[in-house]
Image: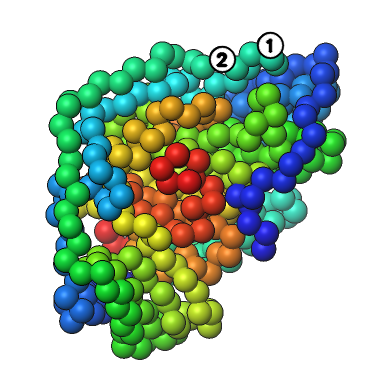
Amino acid sequence: MPNPCKAPSTPPASEMAAATRRTEQVMGTAVTVLVPGGCPAALFDEVFAWFHRVDRTFSVYRPDSAVSRWREFGPGRAPALVEEVLDRCSELYPATDGWFDAWPDGPEGRVDPSGYVKGWSVDVAAALLDGAGIPGYCLAAGGDVKVAGDGPEGRPWRIGIQHPTERMAAAAVLQGSPLAVATSGAYERGAHIRGRAGSSLVSATVAGPRLGTADALATALFAADGAALWFGRFAGYNYLTIGADERVRWTPGLDACLASPRLA
Amino acid sequence: MKRVLTALALTVAGLAAVLGFKTRDPAAASPGSAEAAAGTTTTAGAAVTSPGAAPTTTAAAGATTTTSAGTTATTTPAASTATIEGDGPVVDTRYGPVQVSVVVTDGQLVDVIALQLPSGDRTNVGISSYAEPLLREMALEAQSADIDVVSGATFTSRAYAESLQGALDAAGL
């Protein structure tokens, strides 16, 4: 597994008379695509058409979505996309010792793959950009991020990890390419998430090659309150947790990604 | 699941007790950090900052301000410089046997190595290769960085929160 933190050098983005960013509200959040070197409008259209398709297929708030029908009537003739996502969720359940659970009501209950879908959809969108030969891009979907190639002005992308109490501050900065970063925490959801009394973590960030997996692992790591021996099963993934006691902990593999001066 | 984690926690705690593991003074800064201003730092504000329509300009959204409380943390001298490794007992879980080893340096638990996991791997799941810094020290380092994008938890996706809640419920928390 190549270390995703070691950025390959790519040539400077060529001057193109094309837009460099687009943001749309989709999948219940704001999705932004940044392409410093410029991106044809048709490619932006294709990428966002994909996100809207994911929303139509996987939203648990749309009664006509494939996942809603699955929840109501069982598998039936589920689209291949749904099968793919639920297969991966099925793998993640035992791999995280049960801490990532797309079946919160039990195996016979209603499925909710939302903790994986958003990140996974970004991975697919990244593949679209890769396939189109886009050398550098950043995809951000409601706090989950995937970057590749060079950022603005040919320098590496720099991803801040949200400071849990200072709304305008970063707790740390990561850089790498390609790199996916997902964060799970209580601070944006208010302090009243049931069962969090006595919790020692305020946020859990996971970095690695795939955003879907990173998204699920951040959710699981936060739910497990950082007690995660199972994390070592995920080669190429690293985490950084921030405790209520202000302690910051991270796996040694993250050192290569940390861009903060003293810690790099 | 809870039983497993409790067993592991007890294993680590037991080893730590045997090895003379000492909890670090929360007021102490990490070694190597001679002083750390205990202030709050704010940096670029928008969730996504980018050059926007002008590819040649890097636009930082929001002003960078620093408010320092003016206090200085001191470094506590380490009690010893020894690194000690200790293996825990094999604990049977529903997923298979688990055995961990701990590494204690200068009286601090610096690493947990899984000798046996149900997947059969010997995998390092280390806590940190450094002493654990305080968040405010990390944030001070991060403030000068040009940040393109921020990774953070959002509540805009209710389903995401509900998924987490499901995991919490399943874990019996």
The subunit carrying tag 2 is B
At x 73%, y 34%, the residue is A136
Query: Count the marks: how many?
Result: 2
Tell me residue A233's x, y (percent): 53, 69
Give above or below for B125 relative to B137.
below
Q: Position of residue A151 (x, y in %)?
A: 66, 30
Q: State whether discs 2 and 1 lie on one chain.
A: yes
- Gap between marks 2 and 1 measured at Cα: 9 Å
Query: First in sequence: mark 2 or mark 1?
Result: 1
Amino acid type of the residue tagged 2 in the rendering: Ala
According to the picture, the residue beneath numbered tag 1 turns out to be: B54
Name the residue located 85 percent from the left edge and 36 percent from the top edge: A132
Is A27 rendered above or below residue B43?
below
Q: Quadrant of residue B52?
A: top right
Q: Please name the residue that numbered disc 2 is placed on.
A: B59
Report the front residue among B53 and A140: B53
Q: Secondary structure at mark 1?
A: loop
Name the chain under label 1: B
The answer to whether residue B112 is visible is yes
Q: Amino acid at mark 1?
A: Ala
Please tell me in which quadrant of the rendered image residue A139 appears. Answer: top right
x and y percentages locating residue A4 in the rendered image:
63, 52
